[in-house]
Image (cartoon, coloured by chain):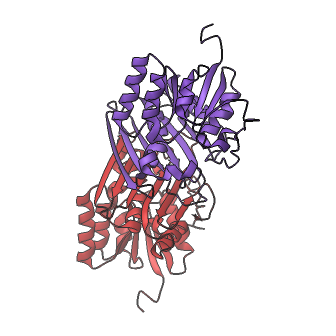
Chain colours: A purple, B red
Amino acid sequence: MSVHDRKLRFGICGLGFMGRTYFTHLRDHSRARVAALCDRDPDRRAGRWNDAVGNLDAAAASPTSDGVFASCAEFDELLAREDVDVVAITLPTSQHADLTVRAFSAGKHVLCEKPMALTVADCDRMIAAARSARRTLMIAQCIRFWPQYEVIKREVDAGAIGAVRMASLRRIASPPTYSAGGWLMRAEQSGGAAFDLHVHDVDFAQHLLGIPESVSAIGRVGASGGVDHVHAHYRYADGRFALIEGGWERHAPWPFVMEITVNGEDGTLHWNMNDGRQVLKF
Amino acid sequence: MSVHDRKLRFGICGLGFMGRTYFTHLRDHSRARVAALCDRDPDRRAGRWNDAVGNLDAAAASPTSDGVFASCAEFDELLAREDVDVVAITLPTSQHADLTVRAFSAGKHVLCEKPMALTVADCDRMIAAARSARRTLMIAQCIRFWPQYEVIKREVDAGAIGAVRMASLRRIASPPTYSAGGWLMRAEQSGGAAFDLHVHDVDFAQHLLGIPESVSAIGRVGASGGVDHVHAHYRYADGRFALIEGGWERHAPWPFVMEITVNGEDGTLHWNMNDGRQVLKF
């Protein structure tokens, strides 16, 4: 039986907000199942994670009992399991590179949370390890798969607004309070908002418009110790440009905002998550 | 009787959308009255201007008859009138400098529509003429007096959000269709959106934060022949910065949007004209 004929078996490593979100969605996916949970905290492995909160309301499911899934306190235990095809790495960004390389050494595929890593050198290590192991590395840049962003990509590619002139992307939040132990607010672990938040729009802008010819950006070092608000201009050789603004320095209870506008010769596409579910076309 | 004791007597030159708006508000002002109307079009001078539309719903009043106000077909007629203290210049931007200089030569004060002029040299001429005539030149940068922007300026100055970190200002529209004869969409007359639209936020950012240490901007030449969408970063020596985005290239019926967010150490102020009348404080 080839891997294409059966459900992919995941081991989730790190049961904070994001690990719980993975659990919920992988458990319900027709092509996936959760084989193992890995975390040093036995309560979390047992699914006692009712403290799960996040910036979006992804209701976290809970394992019905400790015994339904293999329970691993250490990463090596997870890697040793024959019933795990893919390791999902949902631990702080600073750990992504080392854990990814170890997973490839054990012959696993890797689905790793965004952002990929904190340095280009770490990213290169991860890619080299995937190639060497002939396994798949996927970074979970979820915005490419967000329904409204998918609509925008499809409409733009189909020529629905003609030649693109410009895009404006925004992702603005108050300081994250939902990360396990507060790691998001420690730049040495998360990179700050420029890495953790802004990366979504960096990725989507490049997915939609390609690699820019030049980038000009300014930012502010905030409470995380990293750049917690960033403004970037992307400029393309053909005259298109994008403005991307991201940050988590708004004061609570500022509502999480993600917004995208793409202007073309023949029309304008716009979505703001707080205005409704529909992408608007003008 | 000093000028401080009586109503200022205005002559309005140019009865397009903006001239009609001036008429409506000056007529109702306790310290002003409209003494004369100047336009080459006799219908407009007679107040037959029911075609008045604009980007904001300022309902235009109409003179009840031709005889209530002096009616001048030519600018020199307006300047010759003893009963005009202030000339309000509501003609296309490209005419501001010449008309302003002529008004000062005639001993009038000048209230001139924004943007001031299309070149720094023209601005300098206007300032020099005002000084030489010892008369007042005021550019009608109305956003400084817009109630919600006034609230934001007052709150920031009062320390309500602590030390300012950054500001984001936006003013986004579809192409203006309300200018007399379509002059706004001819850059040689209007300068395009970078001059006509973006200037509001350029002015307010400097009013609020001061003169930036550096500015980085990108823009797009649009249908007007001028820059019709612009993104600018303002950077201040003390680390504050502002992002200002302005343009009128959205496709109709995109709603006119003006929005400002100011983030400080202790709070965030936000206003979007489409979200309601109140400035929100987080």
Nearer to us in this view, B270 or A41? A41
Q: Quadrant of residue B52?
A: bottom right
Q: Is residue A70 left or right of residue B206?
A: right
- Residue at the spot x=54%, y=52% of the render? A182
Q: Give B43 or A268, whichever is nearer the viewer.
A: A268
Which residue is drawn at the image coordinates 34% and 76% (left, top)? B136
In percent of width and height, residue B101 lies at: 28, 67
Q: Is residue A122 visible?
A: yes
Q: Residue B87 in the image: x percent, y percent?
A: 39, 71
Quadrant housing the N terminus of chain B: bottom left
Is residue B45 at all visible to an observer of this figure?
no
In the rendered image, the vertical position of residue A185 relative to residue A11, given as above or below: below
Q: In this view, does A56 lie above or below B238?
A: above
**Image coords of residue B111 (percent x, y):** 39, 70
A96 relative to A179, above or below: above
Quarter of the image containing the C terminus of chain B?
A: bottom right
